[in-house]
């Protein structure tokens, strides 16, 4: 079947066979499919959807477009977590060392931030010297030495996904559950995992704003992982407000180190809670703990004992970063930044926060990327003072913006203030951090 | 609005505004829209459709992407016909000289054949020396001198359509009524017409196989023409079998000259009948005749008097072709071709003919194009001996293939034989040539 016949079939709502999907993905990788043909099929897939069989075939074909890592020589369970992306979502920097401290190897291949969301690689690069561009050999050696490594996707892993993602970004075909599943899972399945925990965000700062969409995505991710023999669970977690205290690269690393040092303040508790949940579930899936409850004790003791912090320090050393951030996390914060308070204009209760708008504001002053090629100012960020349910008085600080110049603050002050919905009554909106767990089948 | 926002809007089924459609078409023409973005929007338009307002806006934007001809200095009504394409569909070569002989100027911009359909430009090039690549100046001068001209689309006419059509061909987004309407009408409206008659084909050799699709297309074409101030009618005509006697470039020219010479045999009668219908309706729309009935007399007398033949001869002279084809049409037929009879394998009645398959067979032996860059062998073709409703005996010739080599005939004999469905009872299928007339609003 040629390109047009395959496109026509999906255009008309029929299911593609596995050989047809393989022909498509191979054609994308080889260049036999022109970009305009690929984007036409992506749009037809977006609108008409993919069956579970098609979704598995697409994931498998994208996985097979590149190399798979091989950890058979590592004498430990191999596991990872993946987040669908949010604002202030920094748990990877806690989960990876915690899980490694509990005896599970973590080959964490991460991404960069775009738009309102941050990316783990950007946060890591906020640590002076930290190298996120490991070769496959360096990546494996780091895991063998300290139990985990964090690096970017190499050209050898799922190259079809790189091409398809760039086209989807340019053609408004990102927000499709089957395409998201194939993109995420083709990379994660290349990590040779025993277990994978997915953190699927829902709410105003998530790609899946609606809970029902997030649940559909979570179920599809877990089913696809299971179909490829990986034990999977998904945690549907709240993204109706930024996670924890900080949004911005160095300040998020600071928050994580404070948590790893058992020095978390109240505002950092949600970050700790979610990291513990994710880490605990990984340990259970790997058979390292019997129940989530007992696993959480194990996780907590790796934090209390400093074992997780030492794993993080060891990893930073191995990946070329400055390990003193583990001892003096305050040094991460730039004392020369301007602190601009964002003040409430009315009294009442915080009933909604547009987390996406806060993420966009931080990106706009340089803390993230509007376009993929933008450079990042790691130091700028936002400190959340008030969260959903908090009572406030007119003039209270909703948050504090850390920026370089006064006019940066002025350019986004209105948008930041507008991100908070203040009501006279306390609102009963669901602000629970963990909404639902999707278990494997 | 940027590309992604416009694509997203149509992707989600919303109507685009005229400024959004203009931004799209301007971006296609200027190159600001990447091909992969254009094809993604075309697929979204294909699947989610266009409202009448969107269809008009798209047509207008594509029209405005190029130049419009100006015939204000021609002291005659200006009209054209357009066919949606079929097999053996050769009426343009009769309609244009007939209408010109009746005092209406015909600026006929035509296309080439692709797949199973023939193209007027290819047929004209079967006349030795005939130039279908006129400049705008030559085109106008030819019309002023002999009443009509036939030429290809210049780069100045609807350049957006050229780009869009090539992308649609490569991405399986051809068969969309609003996209077809915008493509056809953006070119026809550039001809500065007073009237336009559309020949919308339906059946096994047409793009619109189903009558209901053909009717929807016909209505959309007429409405769009009316919206731009052009008097329009559509004739929905039969394409369940090849039109008339011949399929193939020189043999189709031969059939037309025989008709213009009033020497048509029985097998050529449907070609004559449809040409008269189309020409008569053009004259009525132009106010040259009061009724279709009286108009048909006028048309017939232009044929009987030889006036139409003389117009054709004059046009061939002006466009550089060999006018002796008008005197010795037999010279068009190559006596060295192999004649291979396609024989019926059973006795009974011809109840169906796959006209598309016959067109494809002729293309495959060189009479048309499989790919856009293929060269054409003008001489090869197919002569229809039996039509729907004819009684046949096993061994009777269903048709005669004119080809270069015996193995050409062998390579398509099975497909040609299989194009005929023979039943024991005479079938009551609708084989009427003129199915319905769609009048202007």
Image (tube, coloured by chain):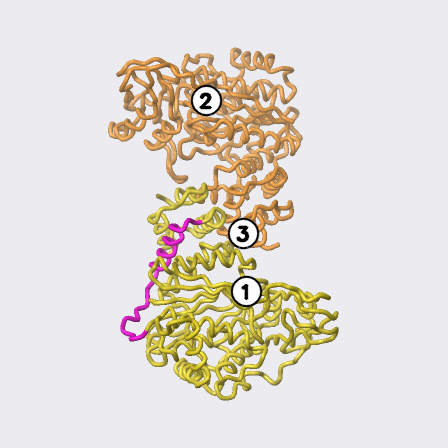
Chain colours: A yellow, B orange
The CA span between labels 3 and 1 is 20 Å
Which contiguous range is marked in magenta? Answer: A50-76
Say yes or no: labels 2 and 3 on the same chain: yes
Q: Was residue A58 drawn as part of the magenta stretch in this picture?
A: yes
Total tally of numbered discs in the picture: 3
Q: Quadrant of the C terminus of chain A?
A: bottom left
Q: Nearer the viewer, residue B57 or B364?
A: B57
- Of badges 3 and 1, nearer the viewer stands 1
Q: At x 46% / y 84%, what residue is drawn?
A: A304
Residue A30 in percent (x, y) is at: 36, 55
- Along the polypeptide, which appears first: circle 2 or circle 3? 3
* Residue A195 numbered mark, or none: none
Q: Which residue is mark 2?
A: B323
The answer to whether one can see residue B269 in this image is yes
In the rendered image, residue B100, in percent from the top left (x then y), is placed at: 57, 21
Whether the residues at callouts 1 and 2 have beta carbons within 8 Å, the answer is: no
Residue B31 shows which numbered tag? 3
Numbered disc in front, either 2 or 3: 3
Report the chain holding disc 1: A
* Residue A371: assigned label: 1
């Amino acid at each position: 079947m040629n390109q047009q016949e395959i496109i026509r079939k999906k255009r008309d709502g029929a299911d593609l066979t596995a050989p047809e999907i393989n022909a498509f993905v191979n054609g994308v990788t080889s260049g036999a499919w022109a970009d305009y043909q690929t984007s036409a099929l992506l749009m037809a897939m977006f609108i008409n959807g993919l069956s579970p069989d098609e979704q598995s075939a697409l994931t498998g074909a994208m996985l097979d477009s590149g190399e798979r890592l091989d950890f058979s020589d590592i004498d430990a369970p191999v596991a990872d977590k993946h987040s669908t992306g949010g604002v202030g979502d920094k748990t990877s920097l806690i989960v990876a060392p915690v899980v490694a401290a509990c005896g599970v190897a973590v080959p964490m291949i991460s991404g960069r931030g775009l738009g309102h969301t941050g990316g783990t690689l950007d946060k890591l690069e906020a640590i002076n010297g930290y190298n996120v561009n490991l070769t496959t050999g360096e990546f494996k050696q780091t895991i063998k030495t300290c139990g985990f490594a964090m690096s970017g996707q190499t050209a050898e892993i799922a190259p079809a996904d790189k091409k398809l993602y760039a086209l989807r970004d340019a053609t408004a075909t990102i927000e499709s559950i089957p395409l998201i599943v194939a993109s995420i899972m083709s990379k994660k399945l290349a990590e040779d995992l025993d277990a994978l925990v997915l953190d699927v965000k829902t709410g105003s700062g998530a790609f899946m704003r609606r809970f029902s969409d997030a649940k559909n995505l979570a179920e599809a991710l877990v089913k696809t992982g299971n179909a490829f023999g990986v034990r999977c669970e998904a945690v549907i977690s709240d993204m109706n407000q930024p996670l924890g205290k900080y949004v911005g690269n160095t300040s998020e690393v600071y928050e994580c180190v404070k948590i790893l040092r058992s020095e978390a303040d109240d505002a950092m508790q949600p970050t700790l809670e979610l990291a513990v949940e994710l880490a605990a579930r990984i340990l259970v899936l790997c058979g390292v703990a019997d129940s989530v409850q007992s696993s959480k004790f194990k996780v907590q003791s790796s934090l209390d004992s400093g074992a997780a912090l030492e794993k993080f320090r060891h990893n930073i050393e191995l990946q070329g970063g400055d390990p003193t951030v583990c001892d003096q996390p305050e040094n991460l914060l730039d004392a020369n930044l301007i602190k601009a308070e964002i003040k409430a204009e009315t009294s009442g209760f915080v009933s909604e926060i547009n987390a996406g708008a806060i993420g966009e504001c931080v990106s706009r002053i340089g803390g993230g990327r509007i376009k993929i090629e933008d450079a990042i100012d790691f130091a700028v960020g936002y400190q959340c003072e008030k969260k959903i349910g908090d009572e406030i008085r007119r003039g209270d600080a909703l948050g504090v913006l850390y920026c370089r110049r006064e006019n940066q603050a002025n350019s986004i002050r209105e948008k930041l203030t507008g991100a908070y919905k203040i009501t006279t009554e306390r609102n009963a909106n669901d602000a629970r951090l963990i909404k639902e767990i999707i278990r494997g089948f």
